[in-house]
Image (spheres, rainbow, N blue to C red):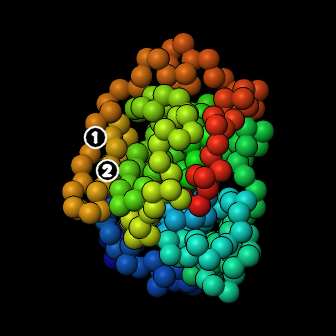
Amino acid sequence: MLREHGLRAASLEGGYGAWLQREMKDWDRYERQMILPEIGVSGQRKLKDARVLIVGAGGLGSPAAQYLAGAGVGTIGIMDADDVSLSNLHRQVIHPMSRLGENKAQSARSSMLNLNDRITVKTYPFRLTPANAAEIIRQYDFVLDCVDNFETKFLINDACVLSGTPFCHAGILRFQGQVMTYVPGQGPCYRCIFGEIPEAGSIPTCSQAGIIGAVAGIIGCVQALEAIKYITGAGDVLTGKMFILDGLTMKTRLASFPHPSPDCRVCGPSADIRDVGDQAQEYESKGSCGAQRDCD
Ligand SMILES: [Zn+2]
């Protein structure tokens, strides 16, 4: 029976009784996912040992944080400089009305620990910047891009590529969403596909064009699933392909991006971006992006 669940006799330190007591605390909580052959006890241990950073505690970060907390990811970092406002609540469902005005990272931490008090949640109640990105990201095994502006998306990409950290990108607008995962050495990065930070105004923002909360929820859950698959090794992550959802028609597709771009400025052979801290001007707003806030 132990072998059936992926348990090894070598792990019975302190005797069977002590082991059983230790393990059974988590057994009930995680049973429904541990009985999956793709997860098992070994996968659950990988989740427990994993460190995942979620940048943005908004519409994408809310479901991602809750499902990663529920799944038992041992250390989760959650970063957001903003406070919870009333216009957030239709999609940022990790924040209750009672925490209006509180910092979103702190509010998210409270909700995550309410769901699972056997994990560690570190909060970063400030923005990811070129000055702090490399130092923070290097402390994590996997990063979720749950932010609402292109400057930070490119910063996350470049800092992750340069530090060899896998991450999952997502974007949402109106009824649509997209997700891709970067794994070092296994496919293109976000910059390979999107090139440069777009000029402000060239792409509509969520505060201008709107977003339906349920789409943010679906896409944030896909990000959580990508993290869980990467950590446990189950299935295939979205490397070299972009998952695209049209929530109005429920059409989905996987756009293929099989190769890194030879012209990529961060992962290509002639890359000129080598240190996000030293090249902070790369991540300055190109025009205005104030309007892009509130659309994560
Ligand atoms: Zn690239």
In screen coordinates, is 144 left or right of 129? left
Q: Which residue is the site of mark 1?
A: 255
Estimate how packed mark 2 is, as few (under 14), some (14 to 19) or many (20 or more) residues with alpha carbons within 10 Å: many
Q: Looking at the picture, does residue 221 appear above or below residue 90? A: above
Cα–Cα span, label 2 and label 1? 7 Å
In screen coordinates, is 192 left or right of 135? left
Q: Which residue is the site of mark 2?
A: 244
**Toward the viewer: 248 or 177?**
248
Query: Measuring 52% from the left and 24% from the top, which residue is drawn there?
Result: 267
Callout 1 secondary element: strand
User: Does residue 258 appear in the picture of this structure?
Assistant: yes
Please provide percent x and percent y for residue 253: 24, 49
Estimate how packed mark 1 is, as few (under 14), some (14 to 19) or many (20 or more) residues with alpha carbons within 10 Å: some
**Toward the viewer: 269 or 140?**
269
Callout 2 secondary element: strand
Query: Measuring 72% from the left and 29% from the top, which residue is drawn there?
Result: 281
Indicate the quadrant containing the N terminus: top left, top right, bottom left or bottom right: bottom left
Whether pointer 2 and pointer 1 mark residues with C-beta atoms closer than 8 Å, the reply is yes
Query: Measuring 26% from the left and 63% from the top, which residue is drawn there?
Result: 248
Please provide percent x and percent y for residue 15: 58, 77
